[in-house]
Amino acid sequence: MFLPIALTWLHFICIFALVSLLLQERKILSMNWSLDTAKALLATDRWFGLSAMTVLASGFARVFFEKGEAYYFSNFFFWSKLAMFIIAGLISIYPTVQFLRWRKPIQAGQTPEFSVDARRIVTRAIHAQMLLVLLIPLCGVLMARGYG
């Protein structure tokens, strides 16, 4: 009885962290570009990735330790949630690669280059992730209510 409660709690806490970190990335992108903002974006993205992995792992643990895989794997909205999460993850690749390229300049104490075009693409990617993250809980609610 304790394990499902703990998994659900962990899953929700990591979802809240994921949303908070996406918002933080968006906020940092709106700031003046400097070495400090580059460092903050790189660190925030690292925590975002860790949070996303924990959301996925705790979600799959819930599948196997709560209602069982038969309940989830036969539900359209479960697959929709998973698909949107994977799409959001794929969208996050570009920003993450962009941020990881900054490690050497940051270690050298230099502000990394961040072109207007790259910044626009990263911002759009974060907006797309935000949209998906807003739709995923809708699928969760529909699934929990027996739809799909």
Image (tube, helix red, strand yellow):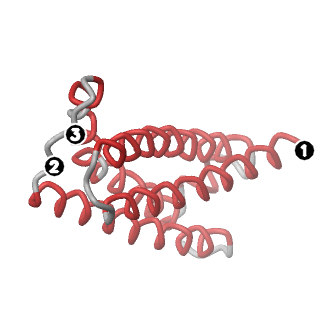
Camera-near label (1 vs 3) is 3
Q: Amino acid at mark 1?
A: Met
Label 1 element class: loop
Disc number for residue 1: 1
- Read off the residue under disc 2: 114
In the image, residue 95 above or below residue 147: above
Q: Residue at x 20, y 33 (%)?
A: 101
In the image, residue 7 above or below residue 136: above
| Residue 71 on image: x %, y % | 64, 56
Q: Residue at x 54, y 59 (%)?
A: 20
Q: Is residue 85 left or right of residue 137?
A: left
Label 2 element class: loop
Q: Amino acid at mark 2?
A: Phe
Image quarter where the C terminus lies is bottom right
Camera-near label (3 vs 2) is 3
Image quarter where the N terminus lies is top right
